[in-house]
Image: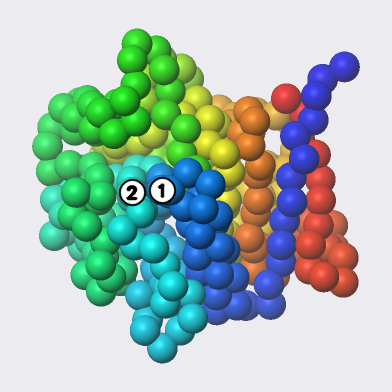
Amino acid sequence: MASRLEVTYRVYPSPDELARAAAALFAERVQQCVTKRDRARIAISGGSTPKQTFALLADGNEPYGKAMPWDKIELFWVDERTVGPEDKDSNYRMTNEQLLSKVPLAPEHIHRIEGEREPQEAAARYESVIRRQFRLEGAEVPRFDVVWLGMGDDGHTASLFPHTEGIHEAGRIAIANHVPQKDTWRISLTAPVLNEALEVVFLIAGPDKAEPLERVLYGEYSPDDTPAQLIQPKNGSLLFLLDEHAAAKLPKPGPDGVGHTGLSR
């Protein structure tokens, strides 16, 4: 009998409340990791919901970042566009503007993807950075404490888009993935790396995400069509933080806003 991965989803009335819940969870998980291992290795994504979450973490008037052990955090990116760090489309630029420029996170703990380089070189250099930081040898895979993901309205996550070669990559940590539907390259962590994380958290908001999310959680397993289905942490946990629009096609959660389901694997 196939094993099933337990999935938890939490539903919030608005994107603002979703961002606040994400900020609170980010702070909580960092504190837990630092207490257990004296550091927190976090991989983050871009997008509008993380943007608001990062702004809350950096806001001195909000509670989330006040007691954050910034000196214990090592920050990585899940993926990046093939642009420089000052480009308006850069995931790094968004994070820097909303968070990094406002908090005391040491530069040597910030591990960005060099999207301005040739794609294959950028992926290779990023993999080398990760190997060095995690002290990996041979075929070892890094294990992030928490990976924060989003999902596109086409069911992609990270930069693993439908029907692209990167979906099937099993041997590398970071790849240059050609995305024909956008006529571009993206640099991305691979699914096996994402699935090694102790915890994976999806932040998903908006009515355009309701149908693909239903497919991810309840549809036939078809990661070529819906790459987010690839994300099934081997030994960790999988949590979806959703606004009401994104959760519209899911079974109603309990009175506490929490729902549960299982994924075959």
Q: Quadrant of residue 215?
A: top right
Q: Could you classify mark 1 by the number of other residues whose Cα lies within 10 Å: few (under 14), some (14-19), or many (20 or more)?
A: some
Q: Quadrant of residue 218?
A: top right
Residue for badge 1:
39
Instruction: Tell me residue 257's x, y (percent).
Output: 79, 68
**Is tag 2's residue or tag 1's residue first in the polypeptide sequence?**
1
Do the CB atoms of the residues marked 2 and 1 lie less than 8 Å apart?
yes
Q: Is residue 118 left or right of residue 228?
A: left
Residue in the picture at 25% in, 49% down: 109
Residue in the picture at 12% in, 37% down: 117
Q: Nearer the viewer, mark 2 or mark 1?
A: 1
> What distance separates the C-alpha of mark 2 from that of mark 1?
7 Å
In the image, residue 113 sits, relative to residue 105, either above or below, namely above
In the image, residue 246 sits, relative to residue 13, either above or below, namely above
Instruction: Tell me residue 216's x, y (percent).
Output: 67, 42
Task: Indicate the secondary structure of the residue bearing disc 1.
Answer: loop
Residue for badge 2:
74
Which residue lies most toward the bottom here? 61
The three-letter code of the residue at mark 1 reads: Arg
Quadrant into which the C terminus falls: top right
Residue in the picture at 47% in, 52% down: 34
